[in-house]
Amino acid sequence: MTTIAVKDEWKNRAKIDNDTYLAWYEKSVSDPEGFWKEHGRRIDWIRPYGRVKNTSFAPGNVDIRWFEDGTLNVSANCIDRHLDKRGDQVAILWEGDDPKDSRAITYRELSEEVCRMANVLKERGVKKGDRVTIYMPMIPEAAYAMLASARIGAIHSVVFGGFSPDALAGRLEGAQSSVLITADEGLRGGRKVPLKKNADKACDIAKKAGQTVETVLVVRRTGGEVAFQDGRDVWWHEAKAAVPAACAPEEMNAEDPLFILYTSGSTGKPKGVVHTSGGYLVYASMTHEYVFDWHEGDVYWCTADVGWVTGHSYIVYGPLANGATTLMFEGVPNYPDAGRMWEVVDKHKVNIFYTAPTAIRALMGAGDDKVTRASRETLKVLGSVGEPINPEAWNWYYKVVGEERCPIVDTWWQTETGGILITPLPGATALKPGSATRPFFGVKPQLVDNEGGVLEGATEGNLCITDSWPGQMRTVYGDHERFEQTYFSTCQNKYFTGDGAKRDDDGYWWITGRVDDVINVSGHRMGTAEVESALVSHPKVSEAAVVGYPHDMKGQGIYCYVTLMEGEEGSDELRKELVAHVRNEIGPIASPDKIQFAPGLPKTRSGKIMRRILRKIAEDDFGSLGDTSTLADPAVVDDLIDNRQNKK
Ligand code: PRX
C-alpha cells in the first residue's frame, strides 16, 4: 500500500503539523474539558459558558450537553462579528447554473439580506422555537433563509430540492412546520425544477394529515409562471422591500436547537436529526479551519447541496463562522460539459475544493483533457466526502486534478456527527489512498464485534465512538427514545455509527461502508425500507425487498426484488412503471437500478426476509450464500439466482 508523506509545501503552509496534531489530540482525549474549554472560545458568546461538557451515553439516560450555560446567536457569529473587519469581503460567491451567471455577496450585504428575511419571518409571526422548512435551489437565498431562522431563534429544517412533494409533506408534518421557504423554480443543468408546484402539492398533502402551512415565502429565481394562494404565499422580493435591513439577534442557549435535518435509517421513516447551537458551531468552524487548512482570504468551494448536512456545516455554518469566502454552485458537474468544475475553479480562483467520490468518478470517465484545459493553479487542498473513495478515483483526483501538489482530505462523518470525525489534516497526516486516516481532536473511535466486544490492533469491525464531541446530534426530533434505541443500544455506553471499518497497523482508519440496511447511492443516503415502502404502495406489488449492490459510478446501486399481486405479470413495461412510481414517491435520487420479479422471497420460518442472501445474489456472488437451511422454502433461492438481473 502506498503512503504519501506530507510534502514540505503542505507543512509550511499548514496551521497544524504532525507534532501539534499529536499533542492536541492527546490533550483532547485525556482532558476533553480543558481542551474544549479553550477551543469553545473560537466563537463569540453573549454569556460565556462556565460548564464545558456534560454528556452521558448511559442506557436509558443518554443526555448530551456542551457549553450548557453559555448563550450566543449563530447568525451573529456568521455575520455580525465579521462586519468591522471584513464587511466588504465576499462572504458568498455564487456561481449559477449558466456559466454567465455569478454574484458576489459581501458580509455587509449578507447582513442586510439575512436581517430582512428575519424581519419578514417575524412579521409573519415566526418566533423562537418555531420550525421553518426550507425547500430551495442552490441560491444565496437558501443560506439567507437558514441564517434568518437562526437569527430569530427559529429551528430550520432544510429539505433537499430533489425530493418529491410526498417526501416534503412528510417532513413538514414531522417537524410540525407552518412556514415554508421555497423558490418559483430551480435550475440544474439547464433544466427547470418545479419547486413551487411541488411545494403546493406538499402543502395540500400535509394539510390533509393535519399540518397546515400558513406562510409560503417564495423567492423568484427563474420568473416562471407559478400559482399563488392569497394570504398564504408571499413573494420575497416584495416583502423584503417593506422591512428594515437590521434585526437584533435573539439570545439563544448553547443547547437550543439550531436545525433539524431528516436522514434515512435502517428502519421506518427518515429521522429528524437535531443539532443545537453552541457545540455545533464550535465543531463546524474548527473542523472547517483545520481539516481544510483554511487561511484568511482563501476561496473555498464545497460542491454539496444545502439540503444535506455537508451543505449545512461546510457551505454555510463552518465557513461563515470563520469569515471565509464560500462558493455556492447552483449547477451540476457536467453542464455545459464535464469541464465545468475546473472552469469554475479557474474563474473564481478556488483554493480549497471539496466534493464527493461519485462526482470524481463521473469526471474521471469524461477524460483528462477536460481537467487539463483549466489551469487549476490556485488549488491547494482537495477534499472528499460521502462514501468510501476507491483508490483508483483517489489517485486520479490526486494526480490529474491536483497534479500531486494538493493533499487529499478524505473526510468521514455523518448527518448525526455534525462535522468531520475522521480525516487527514493537510500539514500533519501522511496519506494512504482510500483511508480516512486519523481521528479529529476529541474523537475516540473504537472497533467492536457483533457481540459488542472491543477489538484491538489491526482488524475489522463495527465502528463506534466512545465519547461525545461538541458537534454530536442531541436527539431525534420528538422521539428521544428512538435516538437512544438507534445509536446507543447496539453497544452500551457508545455511539454506534452504522458503519464498518478497518484499522491498519499504523492505526489508520478505513471505512468499509454501512453494516445496516442503509445504502449510499451517489453519496445520497437512503434506507432500503423507504424504497420498499414506496414499491409496496404500488397497487400491483404485494411485497418488496431492496438491497444495495456495487455500482461503478454510483458506489452503490438500488436492487429491488418485487413480488407481484396474484394474477399480475412482470414485464419491462411494469419495471418502468415501478421506477417512475418510486421517483414520484421519494424523488429521482431513489430510482431503482434493477428490478427482479420474484415469486417468493427467502424467508426464515418466522417470516423474516434473509437479506444476506438477497445481497449476495445482487452482488452476483451466489457461490457463497452461507447457511440456507433455516429458510422456510429453500427452493426460492434457485429461482432468484436463475432470474438475477446482474449476470456478469
Ligand atoms: O457510510 C458513511 C458514508 O456516508 C454515511 C453518512 O451519510 P450522511 O449522513 O448522508 O452524511 C454524508 C456526508 C457527511 C456514513 O455513515 N460516508 C461519509 N463520508 C465517508 C463515508 N464513507 C467512507 N468515507 C467517507 N469519507
Image (spheres, rainbow, N blue to C red):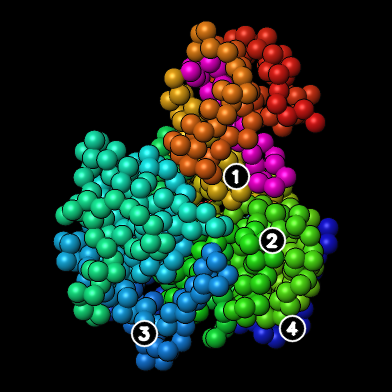
Q: Tell us which disc is closer to us: 2 or 3.
A: 2
- Mark 1: which amino acid? Val
Binning the other alpha carbons within 10 Å of mark 1 as few (below 14), some (14 to 19) or many (20 upward) gives many
Quadrant of the rendered image containing residue 346 = bottom right
Residue at far right of view: 1
Of the residues under marks 3 and 4, which one precedes in the sequence? 4
Quadrant of the rendering where the C terminus is positioned: top right
Residue at numbered disc 1: 521
Q: Which amino acid does label 4 sit on?
A: Glu
Task: Tell us which disc is closer to us: 4 or 1.
Answer: 1
Decide which of tag 4 and tag 1 comes sooner along the chain: 4
Q: Is any atom of residue 18 visible in this view?
A: no
Q: Residue at x 65, y 12 (%)?
A: 636
Q: Where is 543 relative to 289, above or below?
A: above
Location of mark 3 (residue)? 108
Vertical placement of residue 61 versus 563, above or below = below
Q: Magenta residues?
A: 540-564
Which residue is denoted by mark 2 in the rendering? 338
Q: Which of 102 and 258 is in front in this view?
A: 102
